[in-house]
Structures are given as structure tokens and as C-alpha cells.
Amino acid sequence: MRLPKNREAIGYLSLVFMLAAIYMVFIYAPPDKKLGEIQRIFYFHVSSAWIAFLAFFLVFLASILYLKSRSRRWDILAHSSAEIGVILTTLVLITGSIWAKPIWYTWWTWDAR
């Protein structure tokens, strides 16, 4: 599978947007009046969860397309999306526990809120 010629430009553009997002999270956005600074974790927690859902949905679609066409391209997409989904799901669990400790006074509760 050939990579696009402008992949380096996409990487630099992604870096610029990530730096802008980090600036907005830590400098621009004011802390929440009720939760304080710990609320900033939600910017990573929620967005990571949504992107993980998207990654696993891509696994589903690419796997169906692979079974239909037997094209290695879809298998590679499914595999790489699964890796990203697992990493982001792990990040969601970690950031959720970090947020829960000062709010609920425990790292983990089995109550699905």
C-alpha cells in the first residue's frame, strides 16, 4: 500500500493543530467553577473516547470490506485502526481514573455513571 506524497505535510499540520489544542486546554479555557482544574481532563478523556469509537467502527467496516474483496489494503486499515482504538481506550480508562480520584474519592467505582 502506497502512502500519500504529502504525508509529511499532514504530519506537520497535525502537530500545529495539536499544539493549538493543548494551548487552548491549559491556557485559554478557564477552569470550571465547580470541578476546578481537574475538569481539564475531560478535554482528553471525552475526545479520546469518541476517536476510539471511531477507530473500532473503522475496524468493523474495513473488516467487512476485507471479507468481501480480500484486498490487503482493508486488512491493514482494520489492523492499524484496532491498534489506535486499543491505545485510546487505555487512555480513556487512565484519564477517567485520574478524574475520579479527586471527585469520587476513589480511583474506580463499578457504578456506570
Image (tube, rainbow, N blue to C red):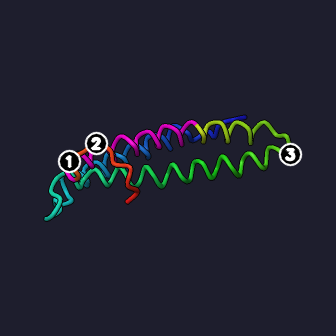
Residue 39 to residue 80: above or below: below
Magenta stretch holds residue 102:
yes
Q: Give the magenta part as a residue range.
A: 83-103
In the rendered structure, the answer to whether residue 56 lies left or right of residue 87 reads right
Q: Which residue is mark 2?
A: 107
Say which element carries label 3.
helix
Three-letter code, disc 2: Trp
Between the residue at mark 3 and the residue at mark 1, the CA separation in whole angstroms equals: 51 Å
User: Callout 2: helix, strand or loop?
Assistant: loop
User: Mark 2 vs mark 3: which is more N-terminal?
Assistant: 3
Front residue of 83/20: it is: 83
Crowd class of label 1 (few under 14; some 14 to 19; many from 20; radius 10 Å)? few
Q: Which residue is mark 1?
A: 105
- Whole-percent x and y of residue 6? 57, 41
Mark 3 or mark 1, earlier in chain: 3
Name of the residue lying farthest toward the front:
110
